[in-house]
Image (tube, rainbow, N blue to C red):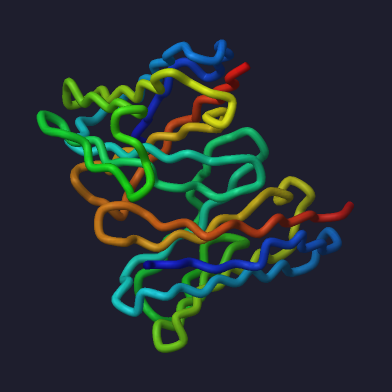
Amino acid sequence: GAVVSQHPSRVICKSGTSVKIECRSLDFQATTMFWYRQFPKKSLMLMATSNEGSKATYEQGVEKDKFLINHASLTLSTLTVTSAHPEDSSFYICSAPVGGNYNEQFFGPGTRLTVL
Amino acid sequence: QKEVEQNSGPLSVPEGAIASLNCTYSDRVSQSFFWYRQYSGKSPELIMSIYSNGDKEDGRFTAQLNKASQYVSLLIRDSQPSDSATYLCAVNAGQNFVFGPGTRLSVLP
C-alpha cells in the first residue's frame, strides 16, 4: 500500500529555535497533504492543508507565520515550527490522499516535538 | 462547526467479548466515515471505512452507519488484548477529516 514517511520521528529543541518536519509520499504523488497536531490524550486537530505550488490553507486559530508550510514538490511537504515554545510540544502528523481520493488517506508515522 | 463526538472511555471488556464503540457527527451532509486505531505514541491506522447505511463487516470488525440518526459505530468481536488502543472516529469534511476525541479501549486478559 501507499507509504507516507516523516522525518524526524522525534526532536527535542530549545525554546526559541525553529524545527523543520518533513512529510514525504514515498510511492505516489500528492498535490495535497494535511498537517495535524495531537496533544496528549486529545484527538487529531487539522492545522493546515498543504498545496503543491501554492500557499497553504490554515485552520482558524493556527498562526501561519509561526507554522510555515512549504509544498515544494509532489512528494514533499515541510512544516517549520518557528520560534518554538514549550506549548508547541506535541505530536505532529501528516497525511496524504492517494490518487486525489480524499477518502483514501495515508498517515505518516508522526513526529514527536518536545520544546524545552 | 463540524463536530464528531465519542465517549472518551476507558471502555473495558474481557478478552473474547464484543466491544462496542459509538460515534455521532453533526454535519448531516457527511458522506464518508472511518474508524482508525491508534496505539500510544503511534500514528492512526485505518480499520474500516463505511459510506452507506447499514453494516459492513471485515473480519472481527463491523461498522454500522445510520445517516438519519447521524450515528456510526464499530463492533469488535472476540476482543483480544492486542485490540487495546484508542479508536478514532473520523468524518470526511470535504478534503480533510474531522476526528472525534477517541475512545480508549482496554481488553482485559
Q: Is residue A53 left or right of residue B30?
A: left
The one of A99 and B41 positioned closer to us in this rendering: B41
Estimate the x, y position of residue A2 in percent, counting from the top left.
34, 34
Residue drawn 40% across the image and 23% down it? A81
Check the image and report above or below for B31 versus A27: below
Res A97 → quadrant: top left
Residue drawn 49% across the image and 78% down it? B71
Res A20 → quadrant: top left
Outermost residue to the left: A53
Tell me if I can see residue B65 in this picture.
yes
Estimate the x, y position of residue B44 in percent, counting from the top left.
52, 43
Check the image and report above or below for A27 versus A17: below
The one of B31 and A59 positioned closer to us in this rendering: A59
Outermost residue to the bottom: B68
Estimate the x, y position of residue A111 in percent, counting from the top left.
51, 25
* Quarter of the image that includes the N terminus of chain B: bottom left
Q: How many labels, in total?
A: 0
Outermost residue to the right: B109
Q: Is residue A14 left or right of residue A2?
A: right
The one of A67 and A11 positioned closer to us in this rendering: A67
Q: Is residue B42 left or right of residue B105?
A: left
Res A29 → quadrant: top left
Residue drawn 43% across the image and 18% down it? A83
Check the image and report above or below for B97 versus A56: below
Residue drawn 28% across the image and 37% down it? A33
Tell me if I can see residue A26 in this picture.
no
